[in-house]
Image (tube, coloured by chain):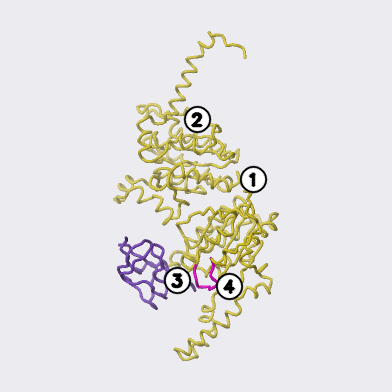
Amino acid sequence: MPDTPADDRHQWAPLVDDLRRRRELALAMGGPDRVQRQRELGKATVRERLDHFVDAGTFVELGQLADSMDPVLAEKGYLAADGCVTGIGEVDGRRVAIAAYDFTVMAGSMGAVNEDKVTRLRELVLRQRVPLVWLLDSAGARVGSGTGSTFAGLGALFREQANLSGVVPQVAAMLGHCAAGTAYIPALADFIPMVKGISSMALAGRHLVKAATGEDVTEEEMGGSEVHTKISGVADLEVEGDLECLDVVKRYLSFFPDNNTSPVPRRETDDPVDRRCEGLYGIVPTAPRRAYDVRKVISEIVDDGDFFEMKPGWARNLVTGLAHVGGDTVGIVANQPMVLGGALDVNAADKAARFIWLCDAFGIPLVYLHDVPGFVVGTVVEQQGIIRHGAKMLYATSEATVPKISVVMRKSYGAGYFVMNGLSYECDYLVAWPTAEIAVMGPDGVVNIAFRKELEAVPEGKERDAKRIELAEMIRANIDPYVAAGHAQVDDVIDPAETRAAIAKGLAISRTKQVFRPWRKHGVLPV
Amino acid sequence: MTEVRAEITANVWQVPAEVGQTIAEGDELVILESMKMEIPVVAPCSGTITAIHVEPDGQVKEGDLVLEIRES
């Protein structure tokens, strides 16, 4: 290196110093007081979050020197990065685009410049086809600038986000109280973990709600993690702290490809693919009416017992989540006999359909574990629209072209069998345990419907009850996996201990799966 | 006081719990029968049962009060 003449260095020094000072200001966020306040709220700063989330030295920031450039906000002085840090970095060695809102700068509100930054990021995501992660800690739109009818030109962010759906994985980590715009961003993302106690999402913040309806509630009561992971089903997981939440995002992303055309990552394991799952004998009762926890079944079957459950606290009668079998990523859809006897209701169908669409979009094979007495019936569920929700699950399973494997453990009745990927649903491998009961409905139902006249011919009381039992036993004899196997309507009957090996076999024979459909713009989805 | 409500419209099959009984979170208190399945009603918390509002062979609708627990 030639020595730089002292005179040249002297000329450049003020310019370089000015740049360094500007960078320092950007990295100082909203200043010491607001940073202190952020910590008091139990939250890490946006820069600490990025340091924790992104592999060291890999973050390429775009627009660090941005400011609000809004004359109305001139008195506020410089607004660091305009309240949203954007860039592309590596997360566990894979590139991810990140938009991280900074609550210390104007409450992380969405202003014109930071929205331009995020728009640029979405454009890059579309060109580079890498996952997009939002770290949301934002009060929503920056009210004050543009509160008039220039609103008419806004909203492109949601349209672009909708169009990225199923192209790249999208994650919205809820790290603070978010309202309006920053509540729709997660709603349009694939995966939404929420930090307990410090995060919320609602279409309107508490002050607006009070003004609009008179209701007096806290952000937490209205849209906290308790609400969205247990009642509304909008969010996927409740996490203790914001850095833990980022670890959960990393874990989620580890299951996914970069985009819908890149290969699904494998995770190698020492867990033998043909390991016998004899633990299942102790978990699943042979008595068909007895409940058990299907999550124990899943842990027994998958690689290293490692299961990443999604929406564990909502629609608990159906379990969904990601795992590996023989190193391959799989999405698991399992009925949960512990809750509602595993019967499907509107929320379970909703949860399943969304999960199936998620896995299908990114090429992740689906494994269905059946133990379902059917859909819940009656007035309550009809008024909730069980037919359209059930149709949605049928639709999602029908549409999915990824490898689809079914294990019928015990009951699989009626439409419950179809939505859980019955043979006719382009199921690639269907196995049944000796306890499997596949039929249009249970014996009691058949007796009451098909044999009503025979029953009524017998005097009411003991005699009729005896007749009912006799007829039910007759019907029960035909509900037998070996009848289905005899008609080659199941591919095999297996020992429960062979379940893991059977799933691996199913994956092995369906790797080259190709399904062709007639051209259409898109279907008309029941929702 | 914690109220335990029915998750589903069902017949009441068994009521192993008794008023005054000390229970732990997760204990099976009542067993309902619906959709061809035994559906256990489990304790959401530990405590003492202060009231039981169902009896065997009775019926519950979704949301009906099944029993009440004083949390410990």
Q: Quadrant of residue A27?
A: top left
Question: Same chain, marks 4 and 2?
Answer: yes
Numbered disc 1: what chain?
Answer: A
Vertical arrangement, residue B34 with respect to residue A248, above or below: below
Q: Is residue A329 visible?
A: yes
Numbered disc 3: what chain?
Answer: A
| Chain-order first, disc 1 or disc 2 | 2
Please identify which colour was used for chain A in the image: yellow
| Chain-order first, disc 4 or disc 2 | 2
Mark 2 secondary-structure assignment: loop
The amino acid at mark 2 is Gly
Question: Same chain, marks 1 and 2?
Answer: yes
**Viewer-nearest of discs 4 and 2:** 4
Question: Label 4: how many residues lie within 10 Å, few (<14), some (14-19) or many (20+)?
Answer: many
Circle 3 residue:
A378
Vertical arrangement, residue A310 with respect to residue B50, above or below: above
Numbered disc 4: what chain?
Answer: A
Question: Label 2: how many residues lie within 10 Å, few (<14), some (14-19) or many (20+)?
Answer: some
Quick one: quadrant of the N terminus of chain A?
Answer: top right
- Distance Cα–Cα, label 1 vs label 2: 29 Å
Residue A7 image offset from top left, x and y in percent: 53, 8
Q: Specify the segment rendered in magenta.
A: A283-291
The amino acid at mark 1 is Ser
Q: Which chain is drawn using purple?
A: B
Circle 4 residue:
A437
Circle 2 residue:
A63
